[in-house]
Image (tube, coloured by chain):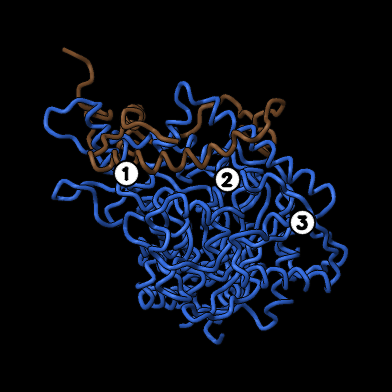
Chain colours: A blue, B brown
Amino acid sequence: MSDVLDLPIAEQADRVARGEISAVALTERVLARIEAKSKLHAFLHVAREAALASANAIDQRRARGEKLGPLAGVPIAIKDALCTVDAPTTCASKILTRRNAEGTAGSTAEHGWRPQYDATVVARLRAAGAVLVGKTNMDEFAMGSSGENSAFGPMRNPWDQSRTAGGSSGGSAAAVSAGLAAGSLGSDTGGSIRQPAALCGIVGVKPTYGRVSRYGLVAFASSLDQVGPFARDARSAARILEVIAGVDPHDSTSANVPVGAYEAACGKPVKGLRIGVPEEYFGEGLDPRVAASVRAAISALEKDGCSVHPVALPHTRHGIATYYIVATAEASSNLARFDGVRFGLRIEPARSDLQTMYGKTRNSGFGPEVKRRILLGTYVLSSGYYDAYYRKAQKARTLIKQDFDRAFEHVDAIAAPTSPTPAFKLGDKADDPLAMYLADIFTLPASLAGIAGLSVPCGMAPATGSEPPLPVGLQLLAPAFQEERLFTLASAVERLTAPNGPALPPS
Amino acid sequence: MAITRETVLHVAKLARLELEDAEIDRMQKDLGNILEYVNSLAELDTASVAETTQVAVVGAPLRADEAEPCLSNEAALSGAPRSNNGGFAVPAFVEE
C-alpha cells in the first residue's frame, strides 16, 4: 500500500493540495499503470493528453494559491456510456463509430462518435478537479452482465484474468480494482454497478432513481437508468457521489432533494440500525461460499449493535421477467435514435432508399444481444401483446415495489448478496442469454423499485480446486434518498471484515 | 412459447433491423426461450394492481419558457455521416 495510487481518494487529493505530489506526476504514474495493465482491456480510450492537460491546470491553480476542489488531481475513469467532449463515446457499440476505409463499421472505439457536450456528471467531476483518465469498456449499450457484449472485446477481472469483471460497467470496476483510477463512474439499470463491484472486490453505488442527473448518459431504459460511482472504499465512493449528485435543469427526472453528507456518514456508529434479511435472496442457486461470507458480515453488524430481522420480499422471483420486459421495451424505443442519420455509422448501398439505409445500418451496427433486446422490446410493445407482456410487467413492478415499501416499515436497510456467485469464467454463459439474465436476480428488484443500493466487499470466497480466492459483495439497500444510511453501514462492514484496508488483487 | 419465423420478421421490420438469414433462426429460438420464461408472470393475480411506469420522481418541474443557448448548426452536424445545406442528408424516401 505504499503507492500513492493505492490510497483512498481523500488522501490522494490532500497530497496534491499540500503539494506533496503534483497532479501531473500523479497522472503520469496512473497512465503508466494503465499501460502496464492494458491486458485487462478496462479502457476503450485512454485520454493521455487531455488528462495531462487538466492535471497541469490543477498544478497551476495550486501555484496561484487558488482553492482546489474535493477531487483535485484525482484520476477518475468514465464509463463509455457517458458523453465527453474531449474523448470518443461509443457505448462499446459499432453503431457509434464511423465507417473505416473498407466501408464497414469502425473496429476500435478510437473511430468513435465525438459528443458536442459533456454529461452533467462529467462536467461536475471536472469542476471538482478530477483528472479524467479515459473511457471504460462495457457491455454494448449497457446490455449484459459479463462484459462479453462489448463490440471491442471483453474486459477482464484483475483477480483472475480468465474471469469476467462483471457487467455492464465491468471496465469501470476493473479499472478501480487494479488501481488504474482512484474512482470511476458507471451506470446501473438492473445491477450494472453493483454486480461488477461485487465481482471485482470494490464498492459500487446505485443511487436512488433521480438522485444523479442522466443528462449525457446514453439512454438504455429511462425509468431505471442511474449513474453512480465506484471506488475501493465507501468513503471514497461517498466523496464522488457528493460531487455528482443533485438536481439538474437538463434532466427533468433529477430530484430536487438536498444532497446528503455522504462522506460524513461514513464511520458513524451503526448501533440501533435495523437490518432486514430477505430469505428469498438465500435460496437455490446461491453459491454456499457467497452465502457464508454474506451471513458472516450480517452477524458482524449485529455484534456491532445492529438488530437483524427477517423480512419478506415475496415477488423477488418475478424480478427477472418483469425487468426483461420493462427494460427491453424502453430500450427498443430509446435505441430508435441510432438510424444512421445524425451520428455514427451509416450503411448506404448505392441507390438505396431510406428504409434500406435504416435496416442495413442498424443490423450491421448493433451486436447480437442488443438486437435480441430490441426485438423482444418491440414484440412486447406490439399490437396484440402489449397487455399480456408490457402492461402485466408494469403491474408486477408495482408488486415488487410494494414488497420493499412494506419491508422498510420495519427495517432501516436490507442486507443480501449482490451476485449469486463470485466472478464466473468468460465464455461460461455467453451462448445462453437466459442463463446470463439469471446472474442479475438479486440486483434487479431494487432497480425496479428505484431505491438506493450499494455493494461493498465483505470477504473472499475461499479457493477451490479450480478457482483462486475471489471477492464477495454484500448488497445493502435503503429507501429512496437514504444513501447516507448505506454509507454508514458499508463503512462499518469494511471496518469489521477488512480492518487492514481493502483486499487488493494480485499485481 | 414458440414464436414463428414470420413473427420474428414482422418485429424485425418494425424495429428496422434487416436480419441475415442465420440470425433469424437464432433470434426465433432465443426469443421463444425468453418469452417462455417471462410468461411466468401470468401466474400473478394483478387484476386490482395499478401499473408503475416511473418511480421516485420528485417534482419533474417545468422551466421558464425562455430561450437558452443551444448547439450551433455546425456543431449539430459535426457527427453526421452526411450533411447538405446545413441539414442532415438522407436517401430519398418519397416516390418521384
Q: Dot 1 falls on which chain?
A: B
Identify the secondary structure beneath mark 1: helix
**Is disc 1 in the same subunit as disc 3?**
no
The reply, left or right, for residue B2 in relation to residue A291 is left
Q: Are marks 1 and 3 in contact (CB under 8 Å)?
A: no
Which residue, as the protein is rendered here, is positioned at the far top? B96
Q: Which chain does the numbered disc 3 sit on?
A: A
Whether callout 1 and callout 2 share a subunit is answered: no
Q: Earlier in the sequence, mark 3 or mark 2?
A: 2
Dots 3 and 2 on the same chain: yes
Report x, y in % for residue A128: 57, 60
Horizontal side, residue A430 vs residue A192: left or right: left
Residue shown at 58% from the left, 80% from the top:
A462
Q: Label 2 sits on what residue type?
A: Ser
Q: Nearer the viewer, residue A442 or A256?
A: A442
Judge by depth and name the residue closer to the eye, A167 or A119.
A167
- For the residues labelled 3 and 2, the Cα–Cα distance comes to 24 Å
**What residue is shown with label 2?**
A213
Q: Residue A336 at what x, y percent from top left?
A: 38, 33
User: On residue A413, which mark appears?
Assistant: 3
Q: Secondary structure at mark 2?
A: loop
Looking at this rendering, what residue extends furthest in the left direction?
A: A350
Secondary element under disc 3, as helix, strand or loop, is strand
Report the Cα–Cα distance between label 1 and label 3: 43 Å
In-front residue for pair A94/A61: A94
Q: CA distance from mark 1 to mark 2?
A: 38 Å
Identify the residue position indicated by label 1 in the image.
Answer: B26
Please state which of the two labelled residues, at mark 1 or mark 2, is closer to the viewer. 1
**Residue drawn at x 63%, y 44% as measured from the top left:** A209
Residue A3 pos. (x, y %): 52, 84
| Quadrant in which residue A382 is drawn | top left
Residue type at tag 3: Ala
